[in-house]
Image (cartoon, helix red, strand yellow):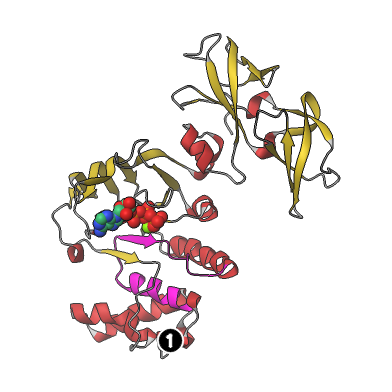
């Protein structure tokens, strides 16, 4: 089991900052997922840990030992890329065995490790095939097998499923979760765009945020368990990033920052938010957030017109327009009778409201979930 600690990591490419003051800890045996918008530096962060890039500043430690100057091959990490990078002229067996043969491991050990990896990944029947005769999912399993046989301290995955179609992605996602359970000593760091992968695989999600101004470099917007990021986004960036459809955000004014429930004016009505009132003052403009599944349709002080309905079978996304000045709110409901043009009352339950101050920082919600 290996702990990975990054402290004050800066990275620039040709003096253009990409990462700035990134701090994070991946605990031994943890499944950590890096997520964030395209180009925010997720792959770069993984490559830094692998030793394929050198940080401009800061330190990377494995189990307390700084490895900034340790060569990639000496770090005992294994990286699995999006584009499998298999040797086309070698069999599945040889693709997995090659790295071990080069290290000079005894044949019997190589056979044992390849057999173990192919059992875990259900590749036994394919060992003699060449990559050209495999499906995308099977090739990705070989690439993962090549990492497993190295018995690395840490697995690094860079969007390993993004070349696969939707059903294969779901299946391989389960396989990776099972792999993490089976190899219980392995720490895994996994980069993805896919929120479902982040939510379902991670013990810890690390959300990266690009700097507000160009050239500033990305930093960590929030790190925590998937449900913590979903239910307690620390800032507007995390609130907007996690969840689909995204959280509804509305301007509001603080009326009374009372303990227990902060009184607010939202879309012309008074309402209460169950959030930590510390630092709020009457008259202060804030932003409130409410997830689509928390808007109650059918009762409440607000009224709006349904301007669009997306019926997905398991539930519907109902777009409700309160007035001409505000964008429609999106509510999730299982009620399939809602129609375009309906005029509906709606409500924001106090315990489901998120509140963000002018700098975008969240006030902690009082009820923990
Ligand atoms: N070798 C390089 N030289 C110069 N700039 C680079 C280099 N590699 C990456 N970059 C830049 O660094 C930034 C971060 O790239 P990176 O690939 O780490 O992002 P990412 O979060 O993995 O993006 P994606 O989600 O699209 O894969 C991008 O602006 C990219 O253009
Ligand atoms: Mg990338």
Residue at which label 1 appears: 132
Percent position of residue 50, x then y: 26, 59
Is residue 292 at least partly visible in the picture?
yes
Percent position of residue 331, x then y: 71, 39
Who's the residue at 53% across and 13% down the image?
A: 284
Image quadrant assignment for residue 109: bottom left
Who's the residue at 54% across and 40% down the image?
A: 230
Query: Does the magenta portion include 140?
Result: yes
Percent position of residue 7, x then y: 24, 41
Q: Give the answer, above or below, for where 327 lies relative to 204.
A: above
Q: Give the answer, above or below, for where 303 lies relative to 176.
A: above
Who's the residue at 46% across and 88% down the image?
A: 133
Q: Quadrant of ligand 1?
A: bottom left
Query: Does the magenta portion include 123?
Result: no
Count of marks placed on residues: 1
Q: Residue furthest front?
A: 324
Q: Residue furthest right?
A: 337
Percent position of residue 186, x then y: 36, 59
In depth, the one of 179 and 143 nearer the eye is 143
Q: Quadrant of the C terminus?
A: top right
Q: Give the answer, above or below, for where 3 lies relative to 234.
A: below
Q: Quadrant of the N terminus?
A: bottom left
Find the magenta span and give its range: 138-165
Quick one: SS at disc 1? helix
């Amino acid at each position: 089991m290996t702990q990975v600690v990054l402290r004050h990591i800066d990275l620039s490419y040709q003096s253009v900052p990409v990462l700035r003051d990134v701090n994070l800890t991946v605990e031994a045996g943890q499944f950590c997922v890096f997520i964030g918008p395209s180009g925010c530096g997720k792959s770069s962060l993984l490559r830094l840990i692998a030793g394929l890039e050198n940080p401009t500043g800061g330190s990377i430690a494995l189990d307390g030992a700084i490895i900034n100057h340790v060569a990639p091959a000496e770090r005992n990490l294994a990286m699995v890329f999006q584009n499998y990078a298999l040797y086309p002229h070698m069999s599945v067996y040889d693709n997995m065995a090659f790295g071990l043969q080069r290290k000079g491991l005894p044949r019997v050990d190589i056979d044992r490790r390849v057999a173990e990896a192919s059992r875990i990944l259900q590749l036994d029947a394919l060992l003699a095939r060449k990559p050209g005769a495999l499906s995308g999912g099977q090739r990705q399993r070989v690439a993962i097998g090549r990492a497993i046989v190295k018995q690395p301290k840490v697995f690094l995955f860079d969007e390993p499923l993004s070349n696969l179609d939707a059903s294969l992605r779901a299946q391989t996602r389960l396989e990776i979760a099972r792999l993490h359970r089976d190899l219980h000593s392995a720490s895994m760091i996994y980069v993805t765009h896919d929120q479902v992968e982040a939510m379902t695989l991670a013990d810890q999600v690390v959300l990266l945020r690009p700097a507000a101004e160009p050239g500033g470099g990305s930093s960590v917007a929030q790190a925590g368990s998937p449900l913590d990021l979903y239910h307690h986004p620390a800032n507007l960036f995390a609130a907007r990033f996690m969840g689909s459809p995204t959280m509804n955000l509305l301007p509001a004014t603080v009326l009374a920052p009372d303990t227990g429930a902060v009184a607010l004016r939202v879309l012309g009505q008074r309402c209460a938010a169950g959030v930590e009132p510390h630092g709020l003052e009457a008259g202060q403009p804030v932003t409130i957030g409410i997830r689509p599944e928390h808007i109650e349709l059918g009762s409440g002080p607000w009224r709006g017109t349904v301007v669009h309905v997306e019926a997905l079978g398991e539930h519907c996304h109902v777009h409700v327009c309160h007035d001409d000045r505000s964008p429609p709110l999106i509510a999730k409901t299982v009620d399939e009778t809602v129609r375009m043009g309906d005029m509906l009352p709606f409500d924001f339950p106090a315990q489901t409201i998120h509140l963000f101050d002018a700098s975008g920082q969240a006030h902690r919600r009082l009820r923990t979930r």
